[in-house]
Amino acid sequence: MDEVFEILDRQTAEIVTEKVPLGKASGRILAAPVLSPIDQPPFDKAAMDGWAMRADETGKVLKIEETIAAGEVGVKEIEPGTCSAIMTGAKLPVGAGRIIRVEYSRRDGETVNIDKDDPLKNIIYKGENMKAGDVVLTPRVLRPRDIGILASMGFAEVEVVIAPAIGFIATGTELKEPGELLKDGEIYNSNGHQLLAQADIWGCRTSYYGITPDDPEKLAETVNRALGENTIVLLSGGVSMGEFDFIPRILEEAGVQKLFHRIAVKPGKPLWFGKNDRNFVFGMPGNPVSTFILFEVFVKHLIQKLCGLAYDPAFIRGALGRDIRRKTWDRTEFLPVKWENEEVIPISYHGSSHLNALAEATGLIIVDREVKKVEKGETVYVRII
């Protein structure tokens, strides 16, 4: 598997960017570090509703000068013996050094009785969260919280990478699209729709070329069309060693140079990867768990590499809830697990066609080559999916 990552990391492509409104930026890849144009907050402000008073005020009954709502600016300077009612988020008036929260007081007309001292100042100071010129965000896949951060700094739009266009081809005479009636011996095509959904999350422009039967001429026609219209082409099925596995030959005849074929990973051993002057091509086995995992582990890695990022998937650590025993151990294996009662529980899993095993999965654990058994209680790392 390390050799696969080394090959993927050697691939390059021109990085092209565009500016998009914040409302269209979630899931896109930030092109460059963003610096804050302002202090955050831009002024000293109230952390809660209460009474703004001098820092050295000791009086228990104070005269109320005015009420300052969020978005307003007080006009009265705070003098000894006085205060102003202030709402959360409002700018601190001149002379104020602390805020007594409203629940520590009783209002009586134009005065307020302070019943309890407040150990906190309850002020968020100018630039406390971020100063002008600080790095707000580094390049990353933008998440909803990142959009909120950018909005808080006044950005209406953001520069993002134009992710590579990806084309999907599902191969197999036995396949039918969801919604069609199945004949004896046929199955539904899940790979095309699953891969589209995986790529859509990453903001990629996607094209789906439907199901192509196991016919060399039709396969070659569809492959060449997809190569002309996309940067990355994904195929499912037709890459193993069977009589109808035409894809490797068709790709090489189309000018795509093979960089590797067959990897020591389970599921996904038949994976084919190659490139030409403008395309990168993954030929995946047809089993749906294989295609899901291969996209998560290898295709995402390449997408981010081509967008200028290092793919850094999220992991959580936990104790294995029951033993894992393997009948074969010649490949690195990805196994679905769920997080339950602070333990990592292997999910009942029957192999690479058992797609619904992923329905309850928190993520995948990676069992290295030559490891025959992982015992209950051992620390394992779960790759979140």
Image (cartoon, rainbow, N blue to C red):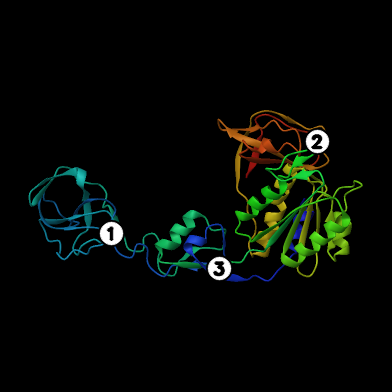
Question: Secondary structure under badge 2?
Answer: loop
Please state which of residues 59 and 237 is positioned toward the viewer in this rendering.
Answer: 237
Instruction: Kindly identify the residue that appears in the image at 84 percent across and 50 percent down.
Output: 238
| Residue 368 visible in the current orientation | no
The image quadrant that residue 371 belongs to is top right
Residue type marked 1 = Lys
**Circle 1 or circle 3, nearest the eye:** 3
Q: Which mark is residue 45?
A: 1
Marks 2,1: beta carbons within 8 A: no
Question: Secondary structure under badge 1?
Answer: strand
Marks 3,2: beta carbons within 8 A: no
Residue type marked 2 = Asp
Q: CA distance from mark 1 to mark 3?
A: 31 Å
Give the vertical position of 377 relative to 298 (above or below). above
Please state which of residues 367 and 168 is positioned toward the viewer in this rendering.
Answer: 168
- 329 relative position to 70: left or right: right
**Circle 3 or circle 2, nearest the eye:** 2
Whichever of callouts 2 and 1 sits on the residue coming sooner in the sequence is: 1
Whichever of callouts 1 and 3 sits on the residue coming sooner in the sequence is: 3
- 101 relative position to 142: left or right: left
The local crowd at label 1, few if under 14, some if 14 to 19, many if 20 or more residues have their Cα within 10 Å, is: many
- 354 relative position to 34: left or right: right
Residue type marked 3 = Ala
The image quadrant that residue 154 belongs to is bottom left
Q: Which mark is residue 32?
A: 3
The local crowd at label 3, few if under 14, some if 14 to 19, many if 20 or more residues have their Cα within 10 Å, is: some
Which residue in the protein does label 2 denote?
184
Residue 203 appears at what percent x and percent y?
60, 59
Q: CA distance from mark 2 to mark 1?
A: 70 Å
**Figure disc tally:** 3
Instruction: Kindly identify the residue that appears in the image at 41 percent across and 69 percent down.
Output: 132
Q: Which mark is residue 385?
A: none
